[in-house]
Amino acid sequence: METDALRQIVEEVVSRYVSPSTTKGVKVKCLTLVCAVMSGFDIVAQQLQALRGSGTEITVVASKNAVSLLGEDRIKTRLGDGRVEVEPPLSRLPDLIADKDVVLAPLLSRTTAIKVATGIPDSAVSNLLHAALAKHLPTLTCCAPEDSASDYCRPVPGLEGRWLEAKRALKNAGLIWIEPEEIASAVQAVVSQARVEPTGVAREVVTVHDVAKVPEGGRLQVGRGAIITPLAQDEIRTRNINLLFVEPGGGS
């Protein structure tokens, strides 16, 4: 094969998988699910803007409670680029998720998390999140701050004690927990890896929150093949953290 032809093939493959948000004809499609959470809204808006700037196509679905708390116009202008679907009917949900590369639930309310984990999704947002995990789509979320002023962020009566249990269950089901400041970089990293290695198996994702738990100069154990977000990589370098890679089963 001629050198120029081979170079063209290599460049096309690299552009298709390494930088999926800006590739020719391979635009990343992200479904963003908005819960009734106010704290952190501005950070999420900035991160979604960054994703759009990189070429990511974002579809926003908001719950009725989110619209009541945040306002439909605010969600449209800050998150939805002028468009948002509010509590679409169940018949619409398969079309919303069918062609998506990644699902993002920024600032997930605890009530919604518990309902999804316990198998009682009762809204478009919780049903779409449940479907994304069932389809093994890369699915990322940030937990709503504990000091959020919204009552929607607090578990419904009778379910308070199930929050940590629900969080563990959702993580085991493949839900990736990140920090709000990592949304744009984490979405791109996870989608890139999924396209290179479409196994349908959830991969470990190391975030800046994980690194922050390790003392300076300490050691962090991660699974081989784990995805380390860019912010986490910066923190590892800055604080001289040593990585110990182990097999997914736990052996080094």
Image: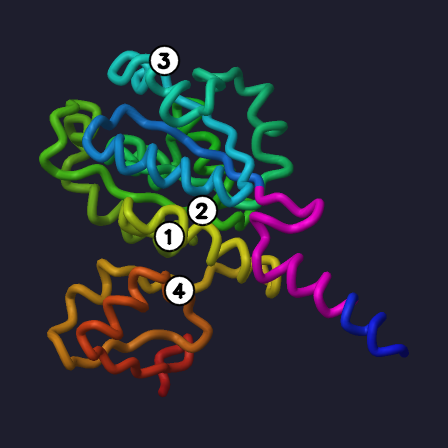
User: Position of 147 compared to 206: left or right?
Assistant: left
- State the image coordinates of residue 42 (x, y, percent, origin top left): 26, 32
How far, Cα to Cα, is label 4 from label 2? 12 Å
Q: Which residue is mark 4?
A: 204
Report if residue 84 is visible in the image.
no
Q: Residue at x 52, y 39 (%)?
A: 30
Task: Give the residue at mark 1.
Answer: 176
**Which contiguous range is marked in magenta?**
9-28
Image spot of residue 64 (x, y percent): 35, 15
- Please, what secondary structure does the residue beneath circle 1 have? strand
The foreground one among 233 and 159 is 233
Is residue 157 part of the magenta span, yes or no?
no
Whole-number angstrom distance, CA of label 2 to CA of label 3: 24 Å
Looking at the rendered structure, the secondary structure element under dot 2 is: strand
- Side of 135 relative to 146 (left or right): right
Under mark 2, the amino acid is Thr
Q: Circle 3 is placed at which residue position?
A: 72
